Every structure is written in structure tokens, then in C-alpha cells.
């Protein structure tokens, strides 16, 4: 087990080191293979953002300069987006059927399949695009509840209980871009790598809670 992958337990979260992610899809494949996720479905998506764009030329907008030197290509930032098992989980707050809940034993956010009515409110509430709807009729919000049953990252809970191994995505990531641990462990590891959190204060407070999010200020 690598240094940056921690075992399960109270307060652990999954968190990306976006500087390390090379968008290879290894986490996505590890998750699909571990959980037999059907070919066209997924529990992890990797979002890629351009880091900069050329600003409007100064003659059109005197207040803007060029964001990059001429001839320079914008870099890319890739973010593995799976469920971060948030402390202040918005998905849990908006779920009308209590299908989503925070397991008091391990603090993972879990789905009770038999209660989910497929309304997709959780998808609107999640800032990270984690909820998936593999059985959805058309992928749109379904007021009548025909969006299928919500599916998302389970933190590999069963695997952790049965084998003591950490989440498959983190374990198989070739660049250790997926960190699993407490806020303290994750911020220390980022610090050791000379990296900062990609997410802003508001997002960190959703994921780790107000108090624990402060450790990322160090
Ligand atoms: S808000 Fe999104 S990332 Fe956070 S626990 Fe819910 S589904 Fe997971
Ligand atoms: S789709 Fe299911 S889990 Fe999501 S908010 Fe609706 S009932 Fe809750």
C-alpha cells in the first residue's frame, strides 16, 4: 500500500491531487473492474479544465490584458470526480426520501436502493457531479421518479471490510493522485508534495466540515 493511501475509518475522505492526475483513466477502469460497472456506466468521471484562455485584445477591451504570452498553449487540469463522502453532504440534505444518509459508523454517504425514487434531486445538490443514474430513461431530471436508482462511489466499503484494502481507484492510480484519509492526513500529504488544495474554502467546508477544512490553510 502506498504512503498516500489510507485505510477506512471515521472521518476518511477521498480527495484528488489534481497536479498529479494525468487523466489516464486508471481510476475509472479500476472502479469498473472492481464493481462490475456496466460498459456504458461509470462511478468516476475525470473533468478536464483549460487553465487559461486568451483575453480579449486590448483594443476591444482596454481593461483586459493577454492572459498568456503569445504562442503559449493553455495547460490542462484534470480532476477525478467521484463521491467525496462530504461532511456537510448537500445530496443528503435534498434527498426527499432519506434514501441518502451518512453512515454513523464510518461517515460514508450511502444509498438505500429500495427508497430511491429516481428524482435526481441529489444530482442537482451535489457540487461535484457524483450521483449517476445508469437506469435513467433519458438522463433528464425526472419529477415522476423514473430516473432509476442513484448509484455512486461507495468508498469500496465492502472491499475494505472484507480485505482491508483501500479504495481500488486510489490503490491503482499510477501517480497517487487520489488521496484517502482524514483532512489532516490529506493536507499533510499535499504539503509534503508542495501542492495546495484545488478546491476553494466553500468546497472544502462541504467535504471536510468547517473545522477540519481549516487544516488546508497551513
Ligand atoms: S454531495 Fe456529491 S460528493 Fe458530496 S457526498 Fe453527496 S454525492 Fe458525494
Ligand atoms: S434520486 Fe434517489 S437518492 Fe437522489 S434525491 Fe432522489 S430519492 Fe434521493
Image (tube, grey):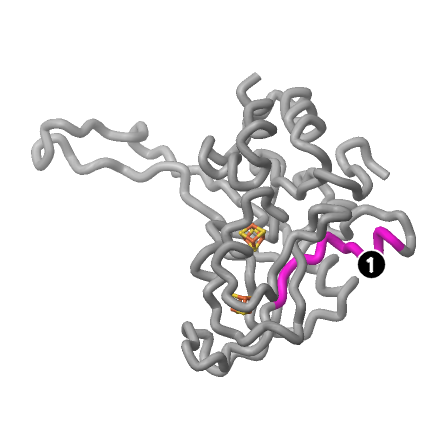
Where in the figure is residue 173, as x and y percent of width and height? Answer: 72, 46
Residue marked by disc 1: 158
- Residue 131's place in the image compared with 50, above or below, is below
Q: Quadrant of residue 182?
A: top right
Q: Quadrant of residue 29?
A: bottom right
Residue that protrudes farthest toward the top in the picture: 218
Residue that protrudes farthest toward the right in the picture: 163
Where in the figure is residue 89, as x and y percent of width and height? Answer: 55, 49
Secondary structure of the residue carrying numbered label 1: helix
Residue found at x 59% / y 42%: 87
Residue found at x 55% / y 68%: 97
Q: Give the magenta part as a residue range.
A: 151-161
- Residue 200's place in the image compared with 158, above or below, is above
Q: Quadrant of residue 112?
A: bottom right
- Residue 45's place in the image compared with 5, above or below, is below
Residue closest to the eye, 135 or 52: 135
Asked if residue 172 can be seen in this view, the reply is no
Judge from the rendering whether residue 1 lies leftward or rightward of residue 70; answer left or right: right
Residue found at x 76% / y 50%: 167
Amino acid at each position: 500500500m502506498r504512503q498516500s493511501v489510507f485505510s477506512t475509518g471515521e472521518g476518511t475522505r477521498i480527495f484528488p491531487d489534481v497536479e498529479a492526475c494525468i487523466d489516464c483513466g486508471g481510476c475509472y477502469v479500476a472502479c469498473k473492474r472492481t464493481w462490475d460497472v456496466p460498459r456504458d456506466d461509470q462511478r468516476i468521471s475525470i473533468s478536464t479544465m483549460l487553465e487559461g484562455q486568451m483575453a480579449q485584445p486590448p483594443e476591444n477591451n482596454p481593461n483586459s490584458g493577454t492572459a498568456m504570452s503569445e504562442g503559449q498553449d493553455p495547460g490542462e487540469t484534470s480532476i477525478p470526480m467521484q463521491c467525496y463522502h462530504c461532511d456537510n453532504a448537500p445530496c443528503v440534505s435534498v434527498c426527499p426520501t432519506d434514501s441518502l444518509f451518512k453512515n454513523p459508523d464510518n461517515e460514508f454517504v450511502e444509498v438505500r436502493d429500495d427508497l430511491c425514487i429516481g428524482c435526481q434531486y441529489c444530482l442537482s445538490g451535489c457540487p461535484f457531479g457524483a450521483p449517476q443514474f445508469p437506469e435513467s430513461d433519458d438522463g433528464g431530471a425526472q419529477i415522476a421518479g423514473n430516473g432509476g436508482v442513484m448509484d455512486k462511489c461507495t468508498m469500496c466499503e465492502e472491499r475494505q471490510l472484507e480485505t482491508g484494502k483501500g479504495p481500488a481507484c486510489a490503490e491503482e492510480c499510477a501517480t497517487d493522485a487520489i488521496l484517502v484519509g482524514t483532512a489532516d492526513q490529506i493536507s499533510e500529504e499535499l504539503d509534503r508534495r508542495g501542492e495546495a488544495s484545488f478546491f476553494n474554502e466553500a468546497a472544502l467546508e462541504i467535504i471536510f466540515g468547517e473545522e477540519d477544512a481549516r487544516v488546508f490553510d497551513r
